């Protein structure tokens, strides 16, 4: 009985730590973090890579956005890496190249076969002139200050990569509003992580890194997470720059949400196994605390949630069960309220209200349960090998 109760409380601690404990700790750290001074005169040459596959609906606007960034025109280039498109993507890019009579230089390079985003990144990197590579998506839009805010971090030789902030332009539906809540928590965690060691990862939609320290693994699904881990293992730090904002629509349907999140979850599972030695023998705060808390536990929480009622059944003691349930509920609720309060203070956004709104609770619960289900689907596909390095296009995220 004692062993079962111990396991029950330990698993409950892991759930509380994952959902509210660790984010609250990072929020407290983020609140105390001072903004680092930047030397905005440091503007190294940057190669922006945009992998594409059948992006005719968005690539024109994307190029216009990148051409007009607030950065020295002759200090960056834009490389469209097209991988096997069979629509008008290449024609649109070629037209933009002819129309572009000024800096920055706009180039199109072609992979005739679609081999996945990692392959496109490596192919584009081999054609890049810059020592700093910035990878982004065709359906994203940058704020004009992105390069100006991200690049000064590279003046520190210890910084190997810098990630920007991913923001939704469409957060007015059930799925996207819940997704925005998740992104707000991500913002808080990355800000705290960056100040004590390194951000756990960078968004695949906006990430910059030193060209000579990392390659994308063409056999991995989430190449952005793998690259972040590679960079940290080489003792470089990963900075987070919340002023470098990238706008990209989130999936607006449950079906598209499952496609996107399942792929990301499979990628995380693969990275856990690929870098197992790093987690088993931690050598820094990143491998000891940050990755296990931010990403690792997420891949095991569905099994923990399933294990708790099973333990209730095995214990079969009503007083023990009720006591445990009430303690977990009270601690979870208190930490959640603290986290929500800190979130409103840190983000300072007009769309957020201070304090906790009970109206948002059903959306949050639904989103959490949906993602727990998606993780289970990811494990099933991972075990049976039903996945590909080719990214699945989510059409609802192409509605700019």
Image (spheres, helix red, strand yellow):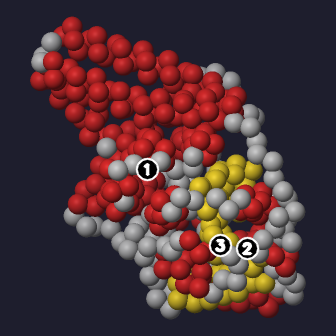
Q: What residue is rendered at 54% in x and 29% in y?
A: 24
Of circles 1 and 3, which is in front? 1
The image quadrant that residue 345 belongs to is top right
Mark 2: give few (<14), some (14-19) or many (20+) Cα within 10 Å: many
x, y percentage for residue 235?
A: 53, 58
User: Mark 2: which secondary structure?
Assistant: strand
User: Mark 3: which secondary structure?
Assistant: strand
Q: What mark, if any, has residue 370 been given in the picture?
A: none
Task: State the residue position of label 2.
Answer: 46
Q: Residue furthest top?
A: 319
x, y percentage for residue 399?
A: 62, 62
- Mark positioned earlier in the residue sequence (2 or 1): 2
x, y percentage for residue 229?
A: 47, 59
The image quadrant that residue 139 belongs to is bottom right
Q: What residue is rendered at 48% in x and 80% in y?
A: 119
x, y percentage for residue 155?
A: 75, 62
Q: What mark, if any, has residue 283 been given in the picture?
A: 1
Q: What residue is rendered at 50% in x and 17% in y?
A: 334
Mark 3: give few (<14), some (14-19) or many (20+) Cα within 10 Å: many
Task: State the residue position of label 3.
Answer: 133
Report if the CB atoms under discs 3 and 2 are less than 8 Å apart.
yes
- Mark positioned earlier in the residue sequence (1 or 3): 3
Q: Nearer the viewer, residue 193 or 370?
A: 193
């Amino acid at each position: 009985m004692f062993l079962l109760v111990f396991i029950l409380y330990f698993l409950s601690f892991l759930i509380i730590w994952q959902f509210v404990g660790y984010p609250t700790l990072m929020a407290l750290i983020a609140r105390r973090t001072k903004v680092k001074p930047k030397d905005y005169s440091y503007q190294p040459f940057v190669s922006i890579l945009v992998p594409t596959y059948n992006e005719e609906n968005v690539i024109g606007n994307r190029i216009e956005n990148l051409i007009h960034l607030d950065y020295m025109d002759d200090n960056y280039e834009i490389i469209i890496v097209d991988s096997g498109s069979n629509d008008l993507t290449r024609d649109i890019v070629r037209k933009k190249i002819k129309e572009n009579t000024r800096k920055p230089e706009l180039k199109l390079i072609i992979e005739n076969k679609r081999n996945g985003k990692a392959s496109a990144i490596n192919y584009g990197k081999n054609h890049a002139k810059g020592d700093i590579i910035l990878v982004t998506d065709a359906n994203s839009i940058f704020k004009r200050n992105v390069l100006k805010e991200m690049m000064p971090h590279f003046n520190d030789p210890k910084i190997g990569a810098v990630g920007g902030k991913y923001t939704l332009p469409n957060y007015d539906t059930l799925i996207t509003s819940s997704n925005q809540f998740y992104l707000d928590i991500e913002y808080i965690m990355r800000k705290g992580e960056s100040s004590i060691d390194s951000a756990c990862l960078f968004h695949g939609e906006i990430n910059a890194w030193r060209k000579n320290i990392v390659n994308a693994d063409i056999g991995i699904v989430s190449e952005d997470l793998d690259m972040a881990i590679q960079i940290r293992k080489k003792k470089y730090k990963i900075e987070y720059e919340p002023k470098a904002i990238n706008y990209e629509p989130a999936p607006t349907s449950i079906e598209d949400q499952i496609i996107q999140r399942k792929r990301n979850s499979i990628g995380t599972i693969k990275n856990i196994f690929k870098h197992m030695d790093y987690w088993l023998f931690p050598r820094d705060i990143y491998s000891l605390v940050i990755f296990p808390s931010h990403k690792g536990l997420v891949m095991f929480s569905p099994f923990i949630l399933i294990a708790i009622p099973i333990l209730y059944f095995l214990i079969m003691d009503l007083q023990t069960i009720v006591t445990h349930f009430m303690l977990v509920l009270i601690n979870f609720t208190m930490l959640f309220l603290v986290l929500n309060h800190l979130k409103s203070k840190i983000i300072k956004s007009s769309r957020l209200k201070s304090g906790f709104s009970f109206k948002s609770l059903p959306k949050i619960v639904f989103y959490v349960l949906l993602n727990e289900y998606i993780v289970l689907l990811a494990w099933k596909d991972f075990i049976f090998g039903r996945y590909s390095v080719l990214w699945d296009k989510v059409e609802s995220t192409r509605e700019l």
